Amino acid sequence: MGFSTSASVVILAASLMYMATIFYPFANLSYQRVLDAKKNLDDMQFDKLNTKIVITNTQNDGGNLKITVYNNGSVTLNASKLNVIHDGALLSASSFSVSQDGVWTPRNFINVTLNGITSGRTKIITSNGISDYAVT
């Protein structure tokens, strides 16, 4: 009974170590993916907390509504990724124009011109969901 017990314990221990060497890389990869997802979530929340836009002026400009928007936050935004909702309907990109495409740095203004619209409730939404609205 002595030798067979010792042999079975050695075989069991060796098989457990072999299973651990197979399991560890998969567990580590999964853990790294969870950490990366958490970092991305933290970055998105940081950007959202530090983004603020303010509609400072609206004016009727010859059949078009011109809206001046101020980036009052500390995050650089992409002006070409703005969404515009007018009177509850999402406007297509061809229905409005932005005075500056691409980088919209903090403490700067842009003008959004709504083609063929003169009044109503308008909401400007950034790519990370922060928005402001004006009623004209």
Image (tube, rainbow, N blue to C red):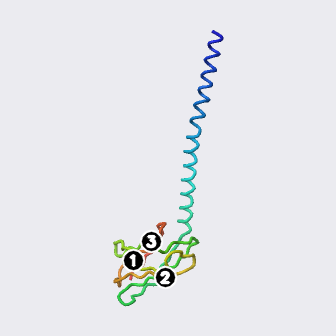
Q: What is the secondary structure assignment of the residue under circle 2? A: strand
Q: Which residue is mark 2?
A: 56
Q: Which residue is mark 1?
A: 122
Quadrant in the rendering for residue 65: bottom left
Look at label 1 and name its amino acid. Answer: Thr
Q: Can you give x and y, in whole percent of width and height, for residue 40 in the image?
A: 55, 57
Q: CA distance from mark 1 to mark 3?
A: 10 Å
Look at label 3 and name its amino acid. Answer: Ile
Look at label 2 and name its amino acid. Answer: Thr
Q: Which residue is mark 3?
A: 125
Looking at the image, is mark 2 or mark 1 earlier in the sequence?
2
Quadrant in the rendering for residue 1: top right
Q: Can you give x and y, in whole percent of width and height, for residue 78 in the image?
A: 51, 72
Q: CA distance from mark 2 to mark 1?
A: 13 Å
Q: Can you give x and y, in whole percent of width and height, for residue 101 in the image?
A: 49, 77
Q: What is the secondary structure assignment of the residue under circle 1? A: strand
Q: Can you give x and y, in whole percent of width and height, for residue 126 in the image?
A: 47, 70
